[in-house]
Image (tube, rainbow, N blue to C red):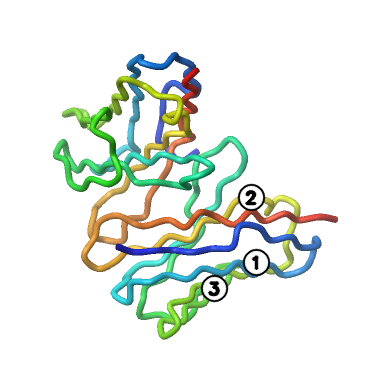
């Protein structure tokens, strides 16, 4: 089945850009998502990209997809302390109804 | 607020007991998913229902079962509980499987088995 990998931690300074990376294994992946989980809350869908796209921008968020390398990234511009959270990459393969989630990257933003 | 309601928020029980977790999906969503989140396993998919029918099964133990009722709310039943079942259990809903599965998550039920 699909395997989704993320690094566990990322620490950045307020105002800098954050880049969270994700790799996956299934080349038939169709939809790729980024979710955000704040303490004590459920996961919230931030953005998603179709596999036929290379990039998607939504305000401070930029998603880049490299299908050849099976690599997905989320860039957060001008990172704020309120962006501190766990960010999950999720990937849905063509033959499945179920997105597979990575283990999440804890983003720590310090002043 | 995602529109997905989970009750209870916290549950403390003993080994060997049985509990029921409840989920009300967003208005109009036909599909319900159950996930288990723990530190060692991450976010694990358990089971999915669509309009009352089981659609997909993941790493769900035989001691666990679920159902989706005609009003579309869902219940996850956990029995013969073990210490290792302590985790955060999430319900999520989506409109239409096969169209991108954009999931909306509830805030979870924190289960502690003592």
Q: Nearer the viewer, residue B35 or B93?
A: B35
- SS assignment at label 3: strand
Q: Are marks 3 and 1 in contact (CB under 8 Å)?
A: no
Q: Nearer the viewer, mark 1 or mark 2?
A: 2
Q: Nearer the viewer, mark 3 or mark 2?
A: 2
Q: Are marks 1 and 2 in contact (CB under 8 Å)?
A: no
Q: Name the disc covering residue A85, or none.
A: 2
Is residue B92 rendered to the left or right of residue B11?
A: left
Kindly indicate the quadrant of the structure image that contains residue B46: top left
The C terminus of chain A: image quadrant: bottom right
**In the rendering, at what x and y percent does residue B102 appear?**
36, 55
**Among the two numbered marks 3 and 2 on one chain, the one whose residue lies closer to the N terminus:** 3
Is residue A94 rendered to the left or right of residue A52?
A: left
**In the rendering, at what x and y percent does residue B53 appear?**
14, 39
Q: CA distance from mark 3 to mark 2?
A: 20 Å
Q: CA distance from mark 1 to mark 2?
A: 12 Å
Tell me the crowding category of disc 2: few under 14, some 14 to 19, or many 20 or more residues within 10 angstroms, Cα based: some
Q: Residue at x 27, y 42 (%)?
A: B47
**In the rendering, at what x and y percent does residue B73 appear?**
27, 29
Q: Nearer the viewer, mark 3 or mark 1?
A: 1
Subunit ID for the residue under disc 1: A
The residue tagged 3 is A57
Compared to residue A108, the image places residue B78 above or below, namely: above
The N terminus of chain A: image quadrant: bottom left
**Among the two numbered marks 1 and 2 on one chain, the one whose residue lies closer to the N terminus:** 1
Same subunit, labels 3 and 2: the answer reads: yes
Kindly indicate the quadrant of the structure image that contains residue A61: bottom right
**Among the two numbered marks 3 and 1 on one chain, the one whose residue lies closer to the N terminus:** 3
């Amino acid at each position: 089945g699909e395997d989704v990998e993320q690094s566990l931690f990322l620490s950045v300074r307020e105002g800098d850009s954050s880049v969270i990376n994700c790799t996956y294994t299934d080349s038939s992946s169709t939809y790729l998502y980024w979710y955000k989980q704040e303490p004590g809350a459920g996961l919230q869908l931030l953005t998603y990209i179709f596999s036929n796209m290379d990039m998607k921008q939504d305000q401070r968020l930029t998603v880049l997809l490299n299908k050849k390398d099976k690599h997905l990234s989320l860039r957060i511009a001008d990172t704020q302390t309120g962006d501190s959270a766990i960010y999950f990459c999720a990937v849905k393969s063509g033959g499945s109804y179920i997105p597979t989630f990575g283990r999440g990257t804890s983003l720590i933003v310090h002043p | 607020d995602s529109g997905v309601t989970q009750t209870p928020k916290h549950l403390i029980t003993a080994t060997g007991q049985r509990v029921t977790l409840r989920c009300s999906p967003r208005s109009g969503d036909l599909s319900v998913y159950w996930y288990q989140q723990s530190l060692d396993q991450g976010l694990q998919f358990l089971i999915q229902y669509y309009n009352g029918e089981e659609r997909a099964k993941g790493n769900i133990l035989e001691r666990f079962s679920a159902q989706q009722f005609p009003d579309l709310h869902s219940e996850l039943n956990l029995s013969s509980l073990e210490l290792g079942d302590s985790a955060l259990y999430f319900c999520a809903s989506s409109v239409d499987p096969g169209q991108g599965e954009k999931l909306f998550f509830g805030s979870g039920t924190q289960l502690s088995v003592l």
